[in-house]
Structures are given as C-alpha cells and as structure tokens.
Image (tube, helix red, strand yellow):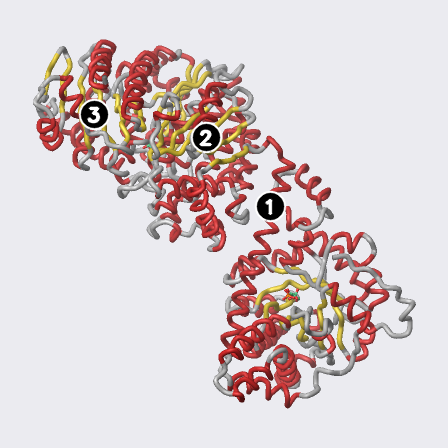
Amino acid sequence: MQITLINAFKNATVNPLQTLQNYGQSVWLDYIRRSLITSGELQRLVDEDGLRGVTSNPAIFEKAIAGSTDYNDALIALEQQQDMDAMSLYEQLAISDIQDTADVLRPVYEQTKKRDGYVSLEVSPYLAHDTQGTIAEARRLWQVVGRENVMIKVPATPAGIPAIEQLISEGINVNVTLLFSQETYELVANAYISGLEAFAAQGGDVSKVASVASFFISRIDTAIDAIATARVKTATSASEEASLRTVIGKVAIANAKLTYQRYQEIYQSAQWQALAGKGAQTQRLLWASTSTKNPLYRDVLYVEELIGADTVNTIPPATFEAFRDRGQPRASLKEHLEEAHDIMETLSRVNISMQDVTKQLLTEGVQLFIEAFDKLLSAVEKKREAVLGTDLDRQSYYLPDDLAKSVQASLKDWLVNGKVRRLWAQDASLWTSTDENRWLGWLGITEDQLAHIDHLKKLAEEVKSEGFKHALLLGMGGSSLCPEVMKLTFGKILGYPELQVLDSTDPDQIKAVENKVDLTNTLFIVSSKSGGTLEPNIFKQYFFDRVQQVLGAEEASKRFIAITDPGSKLQQVAESDGFRDIFFGLPSIGGRYSALSHFGLVPAAIMGVDVAKFLDYTEEMVHSCAATVPASDNPGVVLGTILGVLANQGRDKVTLITSPGISDLGAWLEQLLAESTGKDGKGLIPIDQEPLGKPLVYGSDRLFVYVRLESDPDPNQDAAVDALEQAGQPIVRILIRDPYQLGQEFFRWEIATAVAGSIIGINAFNQPDVEASKIATRQLTSEYEQTGAFPAETPILAENGIQLFTDQKNAAALFEATGDRSLFGYLRAHLDRIQVSDYFALLAYVEMNDPHQAQLQAIRQAIRDAKQVATCLGFGPRFLHSTGQAYKGGPNTGVFLQITCDSTVDLPVPGQKYSFGVVKAAQARGDFQVLAERSRRALRVHLGSDVQTGLTTLQTAIKQVLL
Ligand SMILES: O=C(CO)[C@@H](O)[C@H](O)[C@H](O)[C@H](O)COP(=O)(O)O
Ligand SMILES: O=C[C@H](O)COP(=O)(O)O
C-alpha cells in the first residue's frame, strides 16, 4: 500500500504522530518497499510525521517484491549479470532497500544519539529453531548490510533466545520479534542484559548497542476473542458468561501494560544500573502487530492505548494514516493497571490459558513467516526463470486427476515440513536414518568444480597440444556411463582425441574397442571410484600390457591417467606404475551421483567439451533446485515427487523417451534410478530404449518421461508422446535447448532420485544387491583360478545348438507348467509367467553391437506388444552395475531371460589364470545365481558361439510362442 500524505498543513499545529514523541514514544513504520524510498516518501514521513524507524519482516518483503513491479528491473539486471538462486536474489534486493532506508534514517540515528533511526532486517524464518544457524545468519546479514543503524531481527523462540544473547555479546543490534508472553519477555530481557555484560567484559562499548523487544498486540486479541466468543455460547452460568464477555477485546492491551510494568522494574534493578553507568540503553518494548483486525474496534486502538515513555510503536501504513488523521494521544500505558490485572485474573478464572495461547501464537507466527517467505521465494524464482528463458531446461507434466492430487499432497508435505532444506542439510532421516548424510557431497560439486576449473582447462590444452588421436575410458557403471553420454552426445570434437568407452568383459567387445583406437596414440583413462572394481582393474592390466608391448614400459605410463577416490588401490597402482596424472573424486559422492565430479568432467575435458561452459549451465539448475526454492517450484523436487508418488501407486515403470541426439542419457538415468531406488522389494524400474508403440500396448504401471532436445527433435516421438497423453498416460516433458545443458539434467535427476527415494522409503545411496553378485562372481573366478573350471552345470534342454539352464526352483516351475520339453515349450512356459504389471528383461551377455541390439530390440518389442508389459534390455556385465540392483533388490515383478554365448575369441588377463571369457561367464553365472536366490523368475539361454544365428533361433521361437 502506498502511503499518501494528507495535507500536513491542514493540521499544521497538531500532528498526532509527532505528538507521540512528547510522551516518550517513538513511531516507526512497519512497512518497506522500494518506491517508498525512491519516491522520497520515506524522507517526507521522517520530516513531517516524525518517523524514527522502520521495521520489515518476511511478510512485508513478500508483499513488496512479489506483490509489486517495483523490483522487476533490478531483478532482471541482477540475474542478467550472473545467475543466482532465488534466495540470493531476494537478499540482494532486500539488502539494498535496508541500506537505503538506513541511509535515510541516519540523521535521526545521530540526532537521537543512537536511540532511534533504525531499520530492521529479519533472519530467515527457516532458522527459527536453529540457534547456531541464526547466529551465523545474523552475523552475515550484519556484515553485508554494513550500517550501524540496522537491527537484525531474531524470533523469541527457545532457539532464538540464546542466539540473541550471543549476538548482543558481539555488539550486534537485535530486534527481538514474535514476542507474545510476559514470561518470554523476561527471558529476552535477561538475554539482552547478559549479552551486554559479556560485551562489556570483552571491552565492548555498550552505548553503541541497541535492541528492541517486539511485543505483538492484535494477534492476542484475535486469538483470545475467538476462544471467549465460542465459550460464551457454551457458558454454564451467567457469571461465567459475564466473565468471558469482560475479556473480549481487552487482553492484548492488558498483557502489554503488565509487560511494560516488568520493563520498568527490570531496568531499575541494580544489575541494570551497572550497565547504565557504562552508557547502556534499555531494550525498549516495541509494540508490533498494531493494526486492528476486528473491524468493530477503533482502527487506532493499539496505538492510542499503548502510549508511554521509552517505547516504540511500529505501525503499518493504514493505521499510520488513520492515527495521523484522528489519533488522540494520551499517556495511556500506565492507566488502569488494576483493570489490566483483573482482566488477566478473569482470563485464568475462566480457564483460558495465556501460556497455551501465546505458545500457539509463537508457533503460528513462525509458520506464517515461513509461508510468506516460501511465497516470496516462489515469486522470485518465477521471475528468475522468466529471465533465464530457454537457458534453463524446462519441465512440465500431465497427470490424471487422482495422481495429480497425490503429487500435490506430497509436494505440500515437502513444503510444510521443510524437506527441501533438510535434503540440502543432509538430513539422513529423510531416508532410513542410516548413513545417507555421508553420501550427499554431490549437492555442492558444481560450485566446487567451477572454483577449481583451471586444472581441467590445462588438461584439455595438454591433450590437444600433444595430439592424441583417441582417449579410451576403462570403467564401469558410475565411472563409465556419464563419459559415454558425453561421447555420444558431443561426438568427436575437432582438435581433441575421440573418446571411446569400454565397460564390458566380453572378449569380442574388448577386441572391437581395441580395433577402434590407435594404441600408439591413445590416452587411457582408468576410472574407478572404489579403485577395487574387477573390470576396470583387468581392463587396465590388459591395455597397459598392450601399450607396453607397442611403446615400451616408460612411454606406456605417460599414456595412462587414473580417476579414483583418494587412498584407493587404483591410486597405489597408478603411483607405482608412474601414471601421468591422478584425478581424485570425493568420497562423499557415490558412483552414480558422480557425473559432475571428476568422473564425468575429466573425460569431458579430454574430449574437448568446454567444461566451464557446461558447469555454468548446470549451475542454473542447481540454483533452481536450491534449498530455499519451495517444493512446487523446484524442478528436481517436482520430478522426484512424481516419480516417488507414482511408484507408490504402482506406476513404477519409468519409461524414458529421449531425442536421438541425447539418446544415451537414458543409460545413465537407468543406473541412477534403478540402483538408487530398487531395493527392499521397492523401487523404480527404468525402461530405456523401448521402441515406442501405440497407447494400447502400455499397461497402467507406467510413467513416461520425454526428454526432448529442441535443436533436433524427432517428430515420431512427439506424435507418440502426444497420443500417450491423450490416452491419459502420465507424462513428464523436459525440454533441452542445447546439449551443453545436459548437466542440468544430471543435477535435476540426482535431486529427483534422492527425493523419490525418500518418498519410496529406501536408502537412495547404497547398492546392497550389486555387492551380492560381485561376491558370487568373485567366488566363481577364484574357484576357476584353483581348479581351472567352473562347477559343472547341466542344461534342462539342448536343442539346435541352444542350451537352457536354470536353478532348481525355476526348473520345477517350468516342468510343472509344461509337458513340452522343447525350446518352444520352455519359452512359452517362461513367458506365460509374465503377469499384468510385471516387466520382462533381456539380460544379454553378448557383444553390444548394432546387429545384436536390433535383434534383441525386436524380441523385446514382440513381448511388449503381445503381453502389454514393460520390457528392458541390459547388456552384461554392464547392467550389473546399473539396473542389476533393481532386478535383484527391487519389486519381484521381473521375468528374466538371460542370454549367454561362447566368445569367438578369448583374451588373457595379464598376470591371471583366468581370461576375460572366464570373467564374463562367471559374471553371468553369478548374476543368475543371485537372481535365483532372490526367487526371481529367470531362465538362461546359452547360444553357443554363433550369436547371430542363436539370436535368430531364439527370436523365431519367441515369435511362435507369442502367436
Ligand atoms: O516484529 C516486528 C517489528 O519488530 C513487526 O514487523 C511484526 O513482524 C509485524 O508487526 C507483525 O508481523 C504484523 O502482524 P499482524 O498485524 O499481521 O498480525
Ligand atoms: O557404478 C559403479 C560401478 O560399480 C563401478 O564402481 P567403481 O567406480 O568404484 O569402479
């Protein structure tokens, strides 16, 4: 509301606002807004109305910033200079208002010898129950505002009171807010006095410290009147009814008058006199919440009735004008004290507890400020997003009504319970209260990387100038999937080595990758967080040996770098082999959350991606997902809530549709979603690269997420997704303008996964069932080392070069289901086990190449269309480090067909008896063993050495089964 000045000359002799000074009361304004300052209105209020101070609070700033256009230009200018999160933007705007107001009030501060002339800025209401957080925030604001005549507002909560004492002891001016009860007032006055004593003891000049105790008025009447009015209706006697009527509209003022009595006693005490002797100022009572809320009350009631020496009344604009117009000042505060006592006694006689009411008002007061702040930050975030435009990946969603309602309810829960802030504060109780707090280092990684970007730039320049033709990354899962996304998205960048990724023990695939690189001119990147994973270690042994053969031992070392966590076995190996460089990861980041750490960025820099630019874009999403961005405006939280809520309602098949230019993103997402959430019999089942179909081939267990690259969209995908939406399927749409914005997706989905994990109720940062197959594989390989063979196994069928294997339980189920002991019969029995809302997964331990993919995709599609179930395709062993977790630990709704083969070539692992072929076989068997142990429905098809023919036979048989 704009303060309009009435014609002061009409009332030239008596301005009631000015008259308040004669009674020793200072009038402050409970309002701030940029145009008030810039228009000169604030100065006029000082000059003509005797205004001596200004107070702000989150609700006032919410109205100013969200409810006006005053700040739009400043916000646009700030955001265009540098992207910031909503909280930082708000703070810049608010602090500049506070500084300007302080400057207008500075002469008052000087004329009144530091008694008046203050403007107040409140600490974040999110910290109302956090003593240390409040202290740190108040110190910071005090520093940043940098004006003597500012007061930092701290609420009088149990956590706020020790903070007040500490801040006063540091010489910081404090306005104590949200005071309702006389008891709390005493605690606050004591905190002030103790704080001043501590400040004096350290040699501080106490005359420079100022404080007010903001005692809330109108809310007391609002609360008591409501109770008393309700009780009048149920009163059991005339005297009870009379008593109740006596307190209506009277308690707020009585409460304030009696508190003022305590003020006078406290500041006459000997303890205080000692401080007063040193020049200390009393902590004045400041009447806050002084507009009347009941229209039947005189609009200036809470000004007129509370006038007394050494007090402040902070008045909102309408009341300010009303008082100027018709206020009738008198020394009211010391009047009718007996009556005030009587009112409070009557209140207790009718069993209305001031203690309960004021406690409730404090709780509500904090909550109201939190809600105002949420609203404010939400508005700022929307304005920020409008400035960013398509620089920020956009997200929208369509959900059928019932699902939309559940999602909204969950978002509300995240908002009301401050869960976004708890996530950023690394609060393990959002998940299972085990060790989740140790795994959230990724939250701050982009900022960290940007702060130390030079070594990545240097690395990129070095590999460029040395003219490497290729870079070969050796790693698994979290250490290989992000580099693979980068490789497939950015391709070969001129002047930089072409990146290749090896994440398979399949000898044919290793050979194929080896053939793609020039061993004499390749930089090898051995990437393993733990440094103990079998595959990257044996890849390193193999290629280190190969390069040594070609270039000699000394030269080979110069061609290898390692990315690993500090202290790992890989670090030791890299050091003893004299690798050219080691890049370290952060132990507080698990593999699948490591894309924006060195595990993603070192390979990206080597292949020529401008990592600074990539991270700058990513930061925009980090800011959008910040702790203070309310849940419904926070893109990561919104996505995670949809994922989690829908999973809990049976829509756990997250079907990923990605534009061709970024199609590999799905492989990275598969790992993130499945490994993070698929455990304890719950979780998300990612469905990646499933050929798109018409709506009727999908069940009601799906959520579709369409990640569309706007620079290169696929019209078929657009049409298919539109049709799905029309058919009522839930869809999330994410729009990416430029591949450089892919980092935004890494971050959005990491937040989303953490949120979904919380909603599903699991630990989103461990992978217990991946460990189980690693153990099974290790047992099998060590048995092979000792005996030269695996334990014997007997197929349940051998037909046309194809063998079928399974465990006893699955075999029994198949035998019971069919008397037809043929490939056709077993396949039919196995596929018949697929029920509605199950999913079918092909686990293919064959070389991952185009022809194999095409055949496997065709099998998958045929099953999806015939059974209307979600289908997955994983290549072994890479999926073991990814979706393998959910297949074993997630819901028992998967039906698995494992496909193994004999490789045409085998490759030795230098220094080991076992070969790559042996490792791959052990991995497949270990995988199957754990699936069987977890009572999963699984069958293994062994194709022999002619994979192509074997796959054709399998495809034909399955087609027949599905007919
Ligand atoms: O606490 C101070 C000043 O120190 C005030 O800004 C205080 O927050 C406001 O007076 C109240 O929030 C206004 O409350 P109400 O009139 O909306 O009940
Ligand atoms: O996703 C993680 C893989 O299991 C690889 O782990 P690592 O980076 O410790 O080798």
The x and y percentages for residue 303 are: 72, 74
Image quarter where ligand 1 lies: bottom right
Residue occupying the point 27% across, 43% down: 680
Residue occupying the point 79% across, 78% down: 329
Mark 2 and mark 1 in contact? Answer it, CB < 8 Å.
no
Name the side, left or right, on which 900 lies relative to 331: left
Residue occupying the point 61% across, 38% down: 385
**Residue 86: mark in rendering:** 1
Q: Quadrant of the N terminus?
A: bottom right
Name the side, left or right, on which 884 lies relative to 56: left
Mark 2 and mark 3 in contact? Answer it, CB < 8 Å.
no
Q: Determine whether the residue tagged by mark 1 lies in a helix, strand or loop.
A: helix
Which residue type does callout 2 highlight? Glu
Q: Which residue is mark 3?
A: 831
Which residue type does callout 3 highlight? Leu
Q: In this orientation, which residue lies closer to the viewer: 798 or 241?
A: 241
Q: How many marks?
A: 3
The answer for how far apart the CA atoms under marks 2 and 1 are is 32 Å
Q: Which residue is mark 2?
A: 725
The x and y percentages for residue 219 are: 60, 70
In the image, is residue 437 above or below residue 942? below
The x and y percentages for residue 368 are: 57, 60
